[in-house]
Image: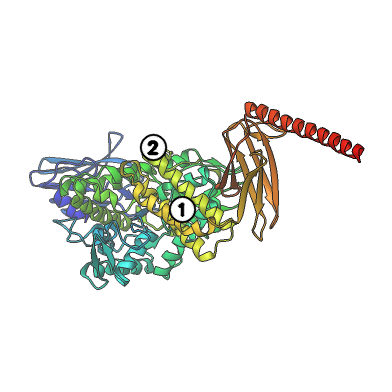
Amino acid sequence: MRLAWALLALLLLPFPGVLGQASGNFVFYADPVAVSARGVLLYSSAPFVLGVYSSGKLVNTFMVPAGQSRVSLPPGNYQLRATSNGITRSAEVQVVADPKPIYVAIVWHDHQAPNFYPNGTFFSNYAFYHVCSDELQPYYRYGVYAFKAQALLNNPGINVSEEVSPPLLLQWEIATSKGYEYQGSYYPPNGTCAKEVRWVMDTFLNLSREGRDEWLTSFYAHPISGYILSRYGWFNLMKEDLIMGENITDSFTDVTQKGAWLPEMAFTMKDVDLLNESGIRFTVLSYGEYLGAEAAPGYKKSSPFQPYVVEDPSTGKTTVAFFRDSAISNYIAFQNNDATAQQAAQSAEAVVQMIYNATNGTSGVVTIALDGENWILDSKYPYNSALFLNDLYALLDQEEAEGVMDTVTLQQALEKVPATQVLYYVPTGSWVDMSFAKWTTQAQSVQLPMWDELNAAHSAYKAAQLLGANFSTLRKAQIGLFHASDSDYYWAEYVDPGPVSVWCKYVEGLLQPVLGKENITVSAYSGGLKVRVANGLDREVNLSVIVGGTFRPANGTAPFNYTVTLAPYSSIALAFRGSPGSNATVLLAASRYPFKSVSLTQPSYSFILIYAVVVIGLVTLIAVYSLRRRKALKSDSTYT
């Protein structure tokens, strides 16, 4: 590949320090990074005199034959000047003595949301389209997922980590096992596209078995767990989501998965416990999260180019975190708009140089982590972005042959560079500016109602759980919540409340038979001044009674929030005072689900006065009548 690069120099503009220079009939190429034990790799189209300069001074001269050759130099930075027939070419090289290479951990996040409704109908076919389409023409006849599998086959020296996300795997399995329905058409499991999908699945699986493509797992859906845990505290829901994702990944491979991808690198310290309790050993976090991280006492945070143990000091639970190189990852993700194949090739060389510069030539783990498909699909020239990846893999393979770099899976990286330093704190955030705004407030007029609807559905789920709903119903509701919390639908530029609303309504519909039963009764009496709450269940429940308006307990002040524990088949009466127009709402405390609400009505003072006058009048009339009756009876007895 390097020789091909040298020949391409005849066609390309100079790329200083990488390709050397080319004009006329003399081509000269020098490997920009070399290990001293191997020497600097050179290529020339004619015999030449090589002058080696350091800090502007000539330190050595060599006579070099045409073709490929090597020159041994001690560690250092050099300028090479090659002269042939009066023409001089130059290149910058760096020679290192470190026998350990730079470990390059490429982590791809291949993901599609679970884009189907509760009835199984698909509302998006991206999971299949990006396998079977010809979106990478004119160079490749297939979609991006098939291309990525083929690119690894084409470059057998490359190792990567790949999160083939659980919902993507599930949709592929549906397509290849029973077919799917989309936009009124049925696509059978023996169709052409389904066969291509099966080839991709089998290829990724075989590469995983070879240890070249390490599968990472993730959540079943794609929640921003850092936000959900820090904002809502739904730990058990997130844990069940992650375990379901693990089970799906495990069902497709016989290789044990040790790492997980956190969607959007959304993190809070509770994610440490989540990963630990789910059996996950390691994950990838953003560089911003590294910057805000704090080392545990007795440890130090010295470089992002090594894995760290992250420990939750409140629980003692741990996981291991790699921190991605944002500069290189974002260069690939957002600056890959190469208009020509030659520019794509130059970009690949630039990335190799960036990897070397990241660690200043010393050994370490450079983690490059990004979406596996979107950076290609969102490019202005996706076919050239595909060429770029093939070129990058080929160059990294050559660097590995030279002993300068070594592509590794995350597990392999841990074996070569163990995590010895401990962090006690990593800040809450995501890869997008250490913020969750992209999914919560950048399109808040749409996003906030979506989160409110999800929160209400979760409250209904918790209420049904407390009221004893059966496992099957709760599991279906749980999966519905997974779908509704998928962050793809909340992303500001592509926000889509439709699937969220459908799945939330599905959850509430499932639970209505449980929530609609008269297990908890609430009634107002004594002129609306008292509320009786009764528990008709065979289990203890915790309830909150919240009073709106200006009503308050007889011996307290507003606002009023009263929490009570009711034993099985027991009740409690609460007295209130205040102005009319208030209401009392009874909630299941653990779920905040608004179970029942009653109106509290207190007579106005004018009515009380009229009522008192009437009562006094009636009492007076009764007294007068009684007195007269006694006198009449007394008169009757006298005549007798």
Q: Quadrant of the C terminus?
A: top right
548 relative to 237, above or below: above
Q: Kindly report the distance in space between the C-alpha atoms of the residues bearing marks 2 and 1.
A: 30 Å
Name the residue carrying label 1.
283
Residue 515 visible within the image: yes
Rendering coords of residue 484 (x, y %): 41, 52
Mark 1, residues whose alpha carbon is within 10 Å: few (<14), some, or many (≥20)?
A: many
Q: Nearer the viewer, residue 628 or 566?
A: 628
Occupied quadrant, residue 577: top right
Q: Secondary structure at mark 1?
A: strand
Q: What kind of element bears circle 2? A: helix
Residue 182, by quadrant, is bottom left
Choose top left, top right, bottom left or bottom right for residue 14. Answer: top left
Please, which residue is most extreme toward the front here? 639
Q: Where, quadrant-wise, is the N terminus in this rendering? A: bottom left
User: Which mark is first along the chain, 1 or 2?
Assistant: 1
Residue 157 lies, in percent from the top left, at: 31, 62
Local packing at callout 2 (Cα closer than 10 Å; few below 14, some 14-19, many 20+) is some
Type of the residue with mark 1:
Thr
Q: Is residue 220 left or right of residue 560?
A: left
Residue contact between numbered discs 2 and 1, judged by CB atoms under 8 Å? no
Where's residue 40, x and y in %?
28, 50
Any part of residue 222 in sight? no
Give percent across and percent down for residue 154.
Answer: 25, 63
Residue at label 2? 444
Name the foreground residue: 494 vs 387. Answer: 494
